[in-house]
Image: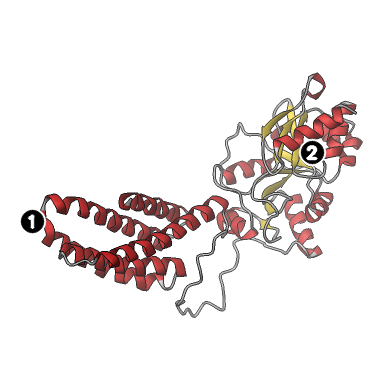
Amino acid sequence: LILIGGFVQLLAGFLAFRKYDHLGGSAFLTFSALWSSYGATRIISAAYPSLQNGFAAGAVAFLVLNAFLSILASSFNVVLLCVTLAMELLSVCFLLFTLENLPLPLEIVTLSIFSIICFYGATASLANCMFGKDLLLMGPPLFTAWSSKKDTPDPPPCVCPKSHCTSGLRTIAELLNTGGVCGVPTDTVYALAASCKHPQAIEKVYRIKERPQEKPICIFISNLEQLRAAAPPISPLLWEFMENVYPGGIGCIIQKGEWLKKLGVGAGYSRVGTQDSIMIRVPDLTVLVHLIDMTGPLAITSANPSGEVDSTHHDMVISRLGHKLEGVLCDGESDEVVASTVVNCTKIDEGGITIVREGCIPAGKVMQIFERVKNR
């Protein structure tokens, strides 16, 4: 069990490094080494009693190293500080064990406390890393380093207006209309947006995300009436299905055609969707709908480096991609932690629909909607 605990801390350390938390990562890796060493010592010392002095020296070294980590942890968060203090107590037990003077009750209490703290810390690190936000609290730092610059924070790397301000919407709309790429909120997670009138902006989206060229980009429109005005060759069944899923977190893949140019896609026609199909979505977010009314259809993809977790707050977009963007429309925390559900409707009249990606809307609910529409 002790060795398993060492593995769990090793995992927590790697997760911390992935979030660029170098102190937390270093601490957990150090604790993994000590925890594993403690377990190995219990096994090896029984077979080789002559190694006790060497183990004692190692325990003293861990005590000194962990003391420095405890000081650093006090300026990081409460959980990490508790882990370092518990590890200090465990190091004492390690030393007493090598000197053959460890009371069993002390060992049991120490291991129990340390296990509980480490379990919570590892679980919190894993959950917060997976979902990209603080689902489990780690606590504030007890001490903060004084800085003469704390009252003058660094300016953001791009324009970051607030979504509730009309001027903010106009700023982002102007950036998009002049060929810029911006981070915007949606009714699911944050997205990168580019005007369909500017194919070079859509190309820039691919570069910013390091997105494979074979992965198509969808478009967002503000309402279904825009699509009706473009007069695409859509069957009554597909129209009715769209009326039941728009606006919302479902995107429909339909046949591509010249009608997209009537929709306002313009010069970006060849850079959205595939050669034969295009995914269209109507978001259920007022601020984004107003923005699309000001810009026309937008090419949209999630605002995260390709293969990484979605961005669920504008701060995540700014910190991860802000230096590559012209602007980010700040709207706080997103309503969802996963992207939209994508449905292939290209063969809806030949037998049904296909769930390409299950997102915030469960596949079962999508199929229920389709069956209800089909059986009317």
The x, y position of residue 318, in whole percent, is 60, 58
Which of the colour schemes (rainbow, by chain, secondary structure, one colour) is used? secondary structure
User: Which residue corresponds to the image point at 40% horizontal and 50% vertical from the top-left?
Assistant: 11
Q: Residues within 10 Å of mark 1 (few under 14, many from 20)?
A: few
**Residue 67, numbered label:** none
The quadrant in which residue 327 appears is bottom right
The quadrant in which residue 251 appears is top right
Q: Quadrant of the C terminus?
A: top right
Instruction: Name the residue at the top extreme.
Output: 350
User: Which residue corresponds to the image point at 82% horizontal and 22% vertical from the top-left?
Assistant: 349
Task: Mark yes or no: residue 367 visible.
Answer: yes
Question: Alpha carbon of mark 1 to alpha carbon of mark 2: how far?
Answer: 78 Å
Q: Residues within 10 Å of mark 2 (few under 14, many from 20)?
A: many
Which residue lies under the disc numbered 1? Answer: 50
Cβ atoms under marks 1 and 2 closer than 8 Å = no
* Secondary structure under the numbered disc 1 in the rendered image: helix
The x, y position of residue 42, in whole percent, is 21, 54
The x, y position of residue 287, in whole percent, is 79, 56
Q: Is residue 360 left or right of residue 132?
A: right
Amino acid type, residue under disc 1 in the picture: Ser
Q: Is residue 71 left or right of residue 228?
A: left
The quadrant in which residue 371 appears is top right
Q: Mark 2 or mark 1, which is nearer the start of the sequence?
A: 1
Amino acid type, residue under disc 2 in the picture: Val
Which residue lies under the disc numbered 2? Answer: 265
